[in-house]
Image (cartoon, rainbow, N blue to C red):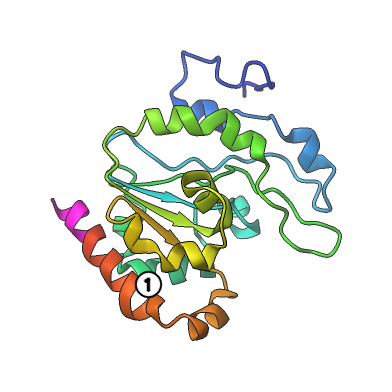
Amino acid sequence: MPVCGQADAASLPTLPLVDRIGACRLCESRFAATATAHEPRPVAWFDAPARVLIAGQAPGTRVHASGRPFTDPSGDRLRDWLGLDHATFYDRSRIAIVPMAFCFPGLDAKGSDLPPPPLCAATWRAPVMAALPHVRLTILLGGAAIRWHLGPGRVMDLAADWRRHAPALWPLPHPSWRTTALRTRAPWLDTDLLPALRDALHKVLDD
């Protein structure tokens, strides 16, 4: 498998972009130094015709093992939020799933997920966005994705102001178990934001 260094991560023109990302080893030494000491395993899930983009954070341990995005409880919660079945959610020609980092960043000494390495988005995000010219609706999950697309701010404040960015951009908290407590303090997520997002999402997918 080709190995990408910092200078040549985007210089494999004979390979499709998804395969170039899959060959990337920019963060190999970074991951080796984490508590998990794992190898890179980029999870790139997109195709050029996609009209919807899900911009997440980074793969967790289960996604690192499966090689398929959102194969965990967060994915179950997200599909419920969006009203999507598995077949539609994983149809790359309709929905692109592009996290801020394609690899599992690893765990710290306390067992918590490390943040997405900024180098990944700096290297790959522009080429991926250029390869997705038909995206009409983007779902931003969590702080890293929201701040990349919308600038600084608290996640729930930006999500509460969703009307400012809809129908093109939809900021959401990450669908982790922590969201359960957040939703009790933010009933508008269930009564306003998610119903509006489901309507907009299905209009784009069914158009």
The front one of 27 and 137 is 137
Q: Would you place residue 161 above or below residue 115 in this image?
A: below
What amino acid is found at the position of numbered circle 1 in the picture?
A: Asp
Return the residue found at the far bottom: 184
Residue 79, can we see it? yes
205 within the magenta span: yes
Q: Is residue 53 above or below residue 125?
A: below
* Residue 174 in sight from this viewpoint: no
Which of the two residues, 62 or 78, is positioned nearer the viewer here?
78
Residue ID at (54%, 78%): 182
- Tell me what residue is drawn at x 39 percent, y 40 percent: 46
- Range covered by the magenta-colored residues: 202-207
Image quadrant where residue 118 sits:
top right
Q: Quadrant of the N terminus?
A: top right
Tell me where residue 142 appears, x and y as whole percent.
Answer: 54, 59
Tell whether 42 sits left or right of 169: right
Q: Position of residue 177 (x, y in %)?
A: 58, 75
Relative placement, left or right, of 43 versus 109 is left
Dot 1 corresponds to which residue?
A: 80
- Which residue: 26% across, 58% down? 201
